[in-house]
Amino acid sequence: MEIYFYNTLTKTKEIFKPIDSKEVRIYTCGPTVYKDATIGNMRTFVFMDTLRRMLKYNGYKLKHAMNITDVGHLVSDADEGEDKMLKSAREEGKTPLEIAKIYTERFLNDLKELNIDMPEIICKATDHINEMIEFVKELLKNGYAYETSTAIYFDVSKLKEYGILSGINLKEQKAGARVELDEEKRNPYDFALWIKAPENHLMKWDSPWGLSYPGWHIECSAMGRKYLGEEFDIHTGGIDLVPTHHENEIAQSKGATNKIPARYWLHQEFLLINGGKMSKSLNNAYLLRDIINKGYDPLTYKLFCYSSHYRNKLNFTWEAIDSTNKALIKLKEGYIQHLNGNEDIEDNILNEYEEKFHKAINDDLNMPVALSYVWELIKYPKKSKKIAELLLKFDTVLGLKIDKKINNKEDELPDNILEMIEKRKKAREEKDWKKSDEIRDELNKLGYNVKDEKDGMVVQKI
Ligand code: AMP
Ligand code: ZN
């Protein structure tokens, strides 16, 4: 079945044709590990997961690289301000490497909680300094870069395609160009490839330009080329990366190899809060841990992400998380009902559902539509093991662990609730069903849903 993607590069929905018919090569811009990743960031990685799972569902093998930015991302995306890693290190009284280690681990842990299918290659910027230096050398040699007393810059006026991704028109921008900090810059949109380090700068490496450190964009160009080649299939990231980071990645690759590195550029729209931006730097962001600490299964957040197409904005509210959590419980209950069912269902009905689900995920990852078919099957009046089997197949794309118990750790429940659970367990062991029902009703009144499954009792805050 054909796969369609909306390609930011061509601004159209296109049929997907990978360079190699069996293996798809993907690059994802990973996190800057200077603070905890927010659930906004996580929306982008849930999207990455869905993309991977959908391609695998279609039979492709994957070679997928995701970077960890542990140097070079300045506070402003326009090459201004301090390096984000150094700022956090200073604020937290740690070394930049310690900061990177802490937040990389926490990020990877969040991916695990969200049951994210991991890229085959995870690469850190600081492990690829030599590759980046080589890239900058090539750009200098090809005449796309120049040196000033503070940095090596990419000269955007040398590339007629500059702006191809974001549609920015440099001639129109000139009139309103911002005030530059570096007067040696030739054009306002020139960006730093390599930055000469001030004496007391903590992260710096030996290079042909003295002790210095990389700009943010060069890391992805260098690592993408190293692991995936000069041309690969798909490049992903959040929508905010289009006019800066990704535009500049394209410029760098054009300058070095005369190729646009990826054929399909896929961008995730933002997760909002109160209709506005949620971000680490604005300090208005929630973490996945906040959702878990309120007693919700982390996969609730993943299911919540599926409520909107990845190219639409999505507004975060706790009410929505609460109702999505109930939906996740219903989904799992519905699966169990089918698994325990003995009714027959005609194969053509199942085939029809499989076809519709497949078409929805292949249509630029239309998860809201795909999920609507999942719900139709869950609610299907005949309860059949064949439906359970099909749902499990769909779950290879959804990644919601529909066959597993809801994951709310008992030790996060308040003591009085834990006590009641213990009493109910005892009542059930003693086959005192009346008492067991009474305690269940009491728990419901206190706002806890109780479900008895084959392998035990599941208690979940409603
Ligand atoms: P960062 O750690 O800031 O480099 O961001 C990591 C990824 O998360 C990038 O692809 C960003 O574009 C993306 N991102 C940041 N904020 C949001 C948000 N509110 N919603 C969706 N994606 C986001
Ligand atoms: Zn990147």
Image (cartoon, helix red, strand yellow):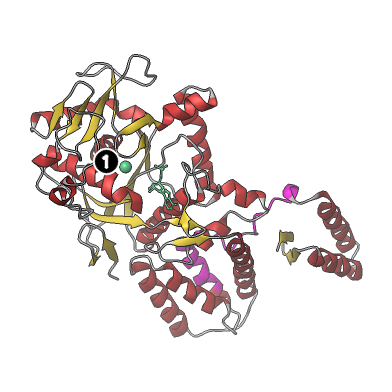
Q: Report if residue 395 lies within the magenta region.
A: yes
User: Which element carries disc 1, helix, strand or loop?
Assistant: helix
Amino acid tagged 1: Gly
Between 26 and 199, the one nearer to me in the picture: 199
- Give the quadrant of residue 218: top left
**Where 158 sits versus 61, above or below?**
above
Between 132 and 231, the one nearer to me in the picture: 132
Mark 1, residue position: 224
Residue 198 image offset from top left, x and y in percent: 32, 18
What residue appears at the point 44 percent right and 78 percent down from the top-left corner? 353
Q: Is mark 1 within 8 Å of ligand 2?
A: no
Residue 232 image offset from top left, x and y in percent: 23, 49
| Residue 61, visible in the rendered structure | yes
Residue 312 image offset from top left, x and y in percent: 39, 64
What residue appears at the point 83 percent right and 69 percent down from the top-left corner? 441
The magenta segment is: 388-412
Q: In which quadrant is the C terminus drawn?
A: bottom right
Q: Is residue 410 left or right of residue 292?
A: right
Between 261 and 62, the one nearer to me in the picture: 261
How many marks the image carries: the answer is 1
What residue appears at the point 25 percent right and 36 percent down from the top-left corner? 179
**Where 188 sits versus 429, above or below?**
above
